[in-house]
Amino acid sequence: MKKFKILFFVLFVIGSLSATTIYDIQYTTNAGDGTYPSPMVDQEVTITGIVTATNYGHGGEYQSFYMCDLPEIGIGAWHGIMIFNTDAEQSPEVGDEVEVSGTVTEYYGLTEIGYVTVSIVSSGNPVPAPVSIICSVLSTTENYECVFAQLTDLTVVQEQDEFGQWLVTDGTGICQVDDEFFYLDTVDPPIVISEGDTYPVIKGIVDYSYNEFGMNPRSPLDFEESGFSENEIVSVKASLSSNFPNPFNPETNIAFSTVSNDNTQIVIYNMRGQLVKTLVDKTYPIGSHSEVWNGTDENGRSVSSGMYFYKMKSGRYTTTKKMILMK
């Protein structure tokens, strides 16, 4: 009976790890036509996650929304996606946990799930805090597409144009802010953007449209013109994504992002906490990276099947995730 319970638990863990996630859909290193299409394009999928934004496109006929993976799966890079909601029976709200089934599509370079059915699992869940990124990363990096994020210490360098777009800088580069969730002049009081204005924080959803990445605030609450609580934001110096595939044999890809020039280290441990291999120990340029672990130790010898942990440290950022090697 004890062996049966252990086997059941292992199968349960493996089944949970192998379920399709938003990360599975979004993560890619294939530039394709320059828009990094999903490796699962045209496939039917079912995913579960938390709604991070609604009313994209100002409502319209279809109530499109954004969602992220459940926090235990991962947050940040590659963990957000747009849902083109054609399910007239369901209009999820921010904080809903939803199950979505549909087809992975590429809409002019934006990965989304369409032709969907939506089931609301629960409501009122906390939305994972926004991931802090910088302008130079937002304007050039695919891995934050559809992610709830924030920019800090911003100065307006160009006022809104006829398309509602305006430009800001944080000193690292210039990026676009857009009004796809609400028009700035329709709120009370209206939000007026003037060159030279400063914002400590602007939050929103990163999207890709007309060959540009942009930040889209979800409501006036995503603007902070003066003062903010350090407890309300997450300052992320880097991000570590779940490895793929998982479980794996014999290789798995570990993707991560750096937004500073700090030394980055990724080390692999076994279940006993013993060091198996130092996979990464160097400084990377700002941006997205990935490394492959081939299931060997420091001496190049193959390791046995089982659960392993990989820990990333980059500057003040540190986190640990788990993976399963099956032979």
Image (cartoon, rainbow, N blue to C red):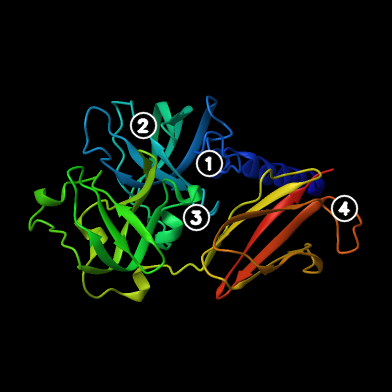
Q: From the image, which quarter does the C terminus lie in?
A: top right
Q: CA distance from mark 1 to mark 3?
A: 13 Å
Left or right of 26? Residue 273 is: right
Nearer the viewer's eye, disc 4 or disc 1? 1
Q: Check disc 2 and report the residue beneath it.
A: 84
Left or right of 143? Residue 314 is: right
Q: Check disc 4 and report the residue beneath it.
A: 304
Please say if the residues under marks 2 and 3 sit with CB atoms less than 8 Å apart: no
Q: Nearer the viewer, residue 183 or 31?
A: 31
Q: Is residue 129 visible?
A: no
Q: Check disc 3 and report the residue beneath it.
A: 75
- Where residue 20 appears, as percent x and y from the top left, is 57, 37
Q: Nearer the viewer, residue 146 or 138?
A: 138
Q: Nearer the viewer, residue 184 or 31?
A: 31
Which badge, 1 or 3, comes first in the chain's sequence? 1
Which badge, 2 or 1, comes first in the chain's sequence? 1
Q: Residue at x 54, y 65 (%)?
A: 238
The disc labelled 3 sits on which kind of residue?
Answer: Ile
The disc labelled 1 sits on which kind of residue?
Answer: Gln
Q: Residue at x 75, y 44 (%)?
A: 248
